[in-house]
Image: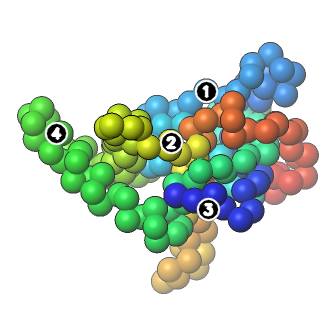
Amino acid sequence: MTELSNPFVLGYHGCRRTVGEDILAGKVPHLLDSRNKWDWLGSGVYFWEADPRRGYEWALDRYGPGEAFVIGAVIHLGYCLDLMSRGPLDLLKPACGSLVRICEMAGKPLPENRRTTRGPSHALDCAVINALHDYRATNQPEALQPFNTVRGLYQEEPPVFENSMIMSKTHVQICVRTPDESIKGYIRVPESQYLP
């Protein structure tokens, strides 16, 4: 919820090789938004901050060794819903309250966060963050400034060692909501930065 003092970060996106190469060749201007109901930071283009290896692990798990690819991006965080700071976190509880009322009025169940065979599903987190964005866009009498990015720390299992509270796949993730404004350029990531 702030313009950060160091607004530029390097982000890494795991994808299919053809997708990454098309971006680097300029055939496609930007990566596509993810709009899955389980995306924990809401809708947008997802990146791992400063961690190309985690991006590669994700792509490897999803696409296999021949297709896994990592593309880097210079990201200007801009007006950021930074979930690692107190101020932005204070916006989430009222957004959840609004979502509860909307679901009740529509007679629909509230989305739930849960574990699945492919990992956690953050359906509630996603719906709350998207509801916050929708509220800001439709606020009356005047819309509120939209967030360019959402940034959060995610502790992902397994533990580094037995009984540890430190998780081996912990990472900072960025969801870019305004790629034309926030992504300043894409870069080829040398394999030496992400291959074990």
Residue 39 visible = no
- Position of residue 105 in the picture relative to residue 121 (left or right): left
Residue 69 or residue 43, whichever sits in front: 43
Q: CA distance from mark 2 to mark 3?
A: 25 Å
- Residue to which mark 3 is pinned: 171
Q: Dot 3: few (<14), some (14–19), or many (≥20) neighbours within 10 Å? A: some
- Position of residue 109 in the picture relative to residue 18 (left or right): left
For the residues labelled 1 and 4, say whether their Cβ atoms are less than 8 Å apart: no
- Residue to which mark 1 is pinned: 32
Q: Nearer the viewer, mark 2 or mark 3?
A: 2
In the image, is residue 1 above or below residue 108? below
Q: Nearer the viewer, mark 4 or mark 3?
A: 4
Q: Say which residue appears at 31% left-offset and 37% top-offset.
A: 140
For the residues labelled 2 and 1, say whether their Cβ atoms are less than 8 Å apart: no
Three-letter amino acid code of the residue under disc 4: Cys
Residue 75 percent across, percent down from the top left: 73, 46
Sequence order check: which comes first, mark 3 or mark 1? 1
Query: In the displayed image of the protein, which residue is found farthest to the bottom?
Result: 163
In the image, is residue 122 above or below residue 155? above
Three-letter amino acid code of the residue under disc 1: Leu
